[in-house]
Image (cartoon, rainbow, N blue to C red):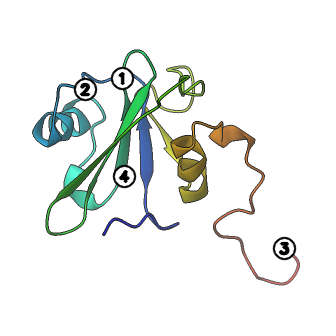
Amino acid sequence: MLQITPQMKILVAVDPADFRKGIDGLVRLCKDSLGQDPFAGSVFVFRNRRRTAIKALVYDGQGFWLCHKRLSTGRFEWWPSASEEDANAKVLAAHQLSVLFSAGNPDRTDAAPDWRSVRPGN
């Protein structure tokens, strides 16, 4: 079973992917375009050109999970641009990924940070 935890690194690819690609093609994109190790347990999220579907790829230690969601109506309006943070991908938190899966805007979530210092005076 696939479970997204707050400790997982989640990367959303800026550029659209060819959705004819399966696991092997997306693994190659992770290595070549994003410069990341797909076997490290990170979650990689890709969209198609029309913004009507997304795919999530993650390695769980035994094999790859490839999840595909296609909207029946509408589009994924939010998507990172190349001008943000890294030119190839944007890092999201686990709760932001849940918002993206619902076709929402992850930048508009006002959740508490995943970790914060508990030292006195902070």
**Residue identifier under label 1:** 48
Earlier in the chain: of badge 2 and badge 3, it is 2
* Element type where label 1 sits in the image: loop
Pointer 1 and pointer 2: residues touching (CB < 8 Å)?
yes
* Element type where label 2 sits in the image: loop
**Residue identifier under label 2:** 19
Quadrant position of the C terminus in the picture: bottom right
Earlier in the chain: of badge 3 and badge 1, it is 1
Pointer 3 and pointer 4: residues touching (CB < 8 Å)?
no
Residue 69, horizontal then vertical, whole percent? 39, 39
Q: Is residue 35 above or below residue 120?
A: above
- Which amino acid type corresponds to the residue marked 4 in the rendered image? Val
Question: Closer to the observer: label 4 or label 2?
Answer: 2
- Which amino acid type corresponds to the residue marked 3 in the rendered image? Asn
Residue at 17% across, 29% down: 21
Q: Residues within 10 Å of mark 2 (few under 14, many from 20)?
A: some
- Which amino acid type corresponds to the residue marked 1 in the rendered image? Asn
Q: Residues within 10 Å of mark 4 (few under 14, many from 20)?
A: many
Name the quadrant containing residue 17: top left
